[in-house]
Image (tube, helix red, strand yellow):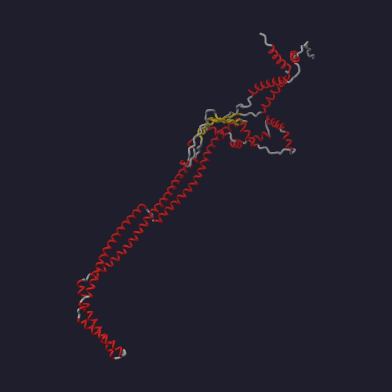
Amino acid sequence: MEQSPEKNRILYHILYVIFRRKILLATICFISFVLIIFFTFLTTPTWEATTKIFIRAHPQQQLILFKDLATPVPKTSTVNPASNLVQMLISQEMAQEIVEKFMLDERLRKKTEEPEKLRDVIKQFLIGVITYPITLAKKIGILEDEPVNFFAGAVEELMEDAQDIELEEDTDVINLSIWEHSPGISSNIANHMAQLLIEKSTEFEQSNASSAHEFTRMQLTSAETALANAEAELLRFKEKNKIISFEEQKKAKLDELHMVETEFINVKTELVHTQAKLNEMGKEIAAQKKLLIESPMFANNSVMKDMVTVLNNAEIQLSGELEKYHESSKTVRTLRAQIAESKEKIEKDLKAIMQSENATLQSIHSDLPKEYVQLVVDAASLAARKDVLQKEIDRIKAEAVSFSVKEAELERFNRRVETNKKLYQNLLDKYSELEVQKASQMSGYDLKIIDKAFVPDDENPDWPKWILVIPLGFMGSLLLSFGAIFFIEYWNESFKSPNEIEERLALRVLCTVQDIK
C-alpha cells in the first residue's frame, strides 16, 4: 500500500532535520541531562515524616457563665472542626515555635555562611554569582546593607517548603507531613507539632477558663461584699424597729389594740354611770342644805330673836353716841363692851343650836358625804384612765399603720438579701467549676495521635529519587533537544531539498550538485 506524498514529505523532513542537526541534538541532550543531574545533586536530600492526628469535637466544653443569659449557638454543619486545627498547624506562630525549638535558623545560617558539604558550597557560590550586582551595589553604597534575618528565612522555608498539612478527605484525620534534611529531625518536628497542637488546644480552653475564673473571682468578691452589706442593713433595720418575727409582732400589736379598746369602752361606760350617780347625789346634798337653813334655830327660836334685838339696839345706840362723843369717852367704851358681850353670847348659843341640829341630820344621812366624795374621786380616776387609754389607742393605731411601711421596707431588705444570696451562690458554684476546669487538661477537641512519625536512619531520602530522576531526566533532555533543533529549523529560511525549491519558486530543478568534502 503506497503512502501519500504528503506523509512521505513530512517523514522525509523530520529525518532530514534529525540527521542534519544530529551533532546539535546530541550536544543539547547531553548538556541538558548533565544540568538536570547537576541541579538534582544541588538539591538537599529530604526525608518525609508523617503524623496522623484524629480529631473529635467536645461540644459539652462550651464555656457558659450564666445559662439563663446564654443563647445556644447552632453548630456549623459546613465546617469540619479539623479544618480549624489545620489552620493552627500552618500558622506563622506554630512555625516560629518549631524554628526556635529545633534551631532551624542557626542551621540556615551555617549553610549560608559556613557551608560544609560540597553541594552547599556550590549552591552558595552560584547564589553569590547571581547576586553579585546587588552585593556590589551594597559595597559602593548604592543599596543599604541590611543584616540577613535567618530566623524569618527559616520560618518562611518551613511554611512554604518543609511542611505539607492537609485534611484527609471524608475523615476527621489530619496528615501532618514534614520534609527535612535528616530522618530524625523530620520525625521529631512532625511529632512535636502534633503534640504542640494538642497543648495549644488545651491552652486555649484553659485560657478561656482562666479568664472566666479571674472574672468570676472578682465578681464573687463583689457579690460577697454586696451580700454582707445587704445583711447588715437588714439587721440594723430589725434592731432599730425591734423586729424579731414580723407576723407575730403584728398579731401581738393587733391583740394589744383590741384589749386596750375593750378596756377603754369599759372605763367609758363606768365613767358615765359614776357621773350619773354623782349628779343624783349632788341633788340630794343640795336638798339637805336647804333643809338645814330652814330649821327652827333660824325661824322659831325666841331666845335668838331677843339676843339679836339687843345687839341691834346696842349698835344703833353706839352710832348715836359716836356722833356726840369721842371714841375714848366712857359711854362709847361701855357700849362697845356690851356689843362684844352680846356677840359672844349669840355665837355661843348658835354653836350649841347648830351642834344639836347637825347631830340630828347626821344621824339620818351619815354616809352621804363619804359616798359623794368617793364618787368624785372615782369619776376623776376614771376620766384620767380614759384619757390614758385614748392616748394608748392612738399610739397603737399609729404603730399599726406604720407596720405597713415597715413591712414594705422589710420586704425590700429581704428581697435584696435573697437576690444577692442567689447571685453569690451561682458565682460560687461557677467558681468551683472553673477551678476544676482550669486545673484539668480538657480541650475543646478530643485530639489523638493515631500514627506517630518515624523514619529509620538508613531510609533513602524521599527526594530526590535518583531512580526516577535519571530516566526522566534523560527523556526530558531528549525532548528538549528535539524541540530545540526543530525550533531552530523552523526559523531557517534556506532551501533544504529540490522539492522545496519547486514549491516555493515554481521552477523546475534540472540537477543537484552534492557537497564536495
Instruction: Name the image quarter holding residue 361.
Output: bottom left
Q: Position of residue 374 (x, y in %)?
A: 26, 68
Q: Residue at x 23, y 75 (%)?
A: 293
Q: Is residue 324 left or right of residue 101?
A: left
Q: Is residue 147 left or right of residue 294?
A: right
Q: Position of residue 188 (x, y in %)?
A: 58, 33
Q: Which quarter of the figure is the C terminus placed in?
A: top right
Q: Is residue 123 left or right of residue 425?
A: right
Q: Residue at x 31, y 64 (%)?
A: 383
371 shown above or below 266: below
Nearer-the-camera pick, 131 or 13: 13
Instruction: Name the image quarter holding residue 17.
Output: top right
Q: Residue at x 20, y 74 (%)?
A: 360
Q: Is residue 453 visible?
A: no
Q: Is residue 225 left or right of residue 175?
A: left
Q: Position of residue 146 (x, y in %)?
A: 69, 39
Instruction: Count the numbered circles shown.
Output: 0
Q: Is residue 34 visible?
A: yes
Q: Position of residue 366 (x, y in %)?
A: 21, 71
Residue lying farthest to the top in this orientation: 1
Q: Residue at x 49, y 45 (%)?
A: 216
Residue lying farthest to the right in this orientation: 516
Nearer-the-camera pick, 487 or 292: 292
202 shown above or below 352: above
Q: Which quarter of the figure is the N terminus placed in?
A: top right
Nearer-the-camera pick, 465 or 365: 365
Nearer-the-camera pick, 370 or 468: 370
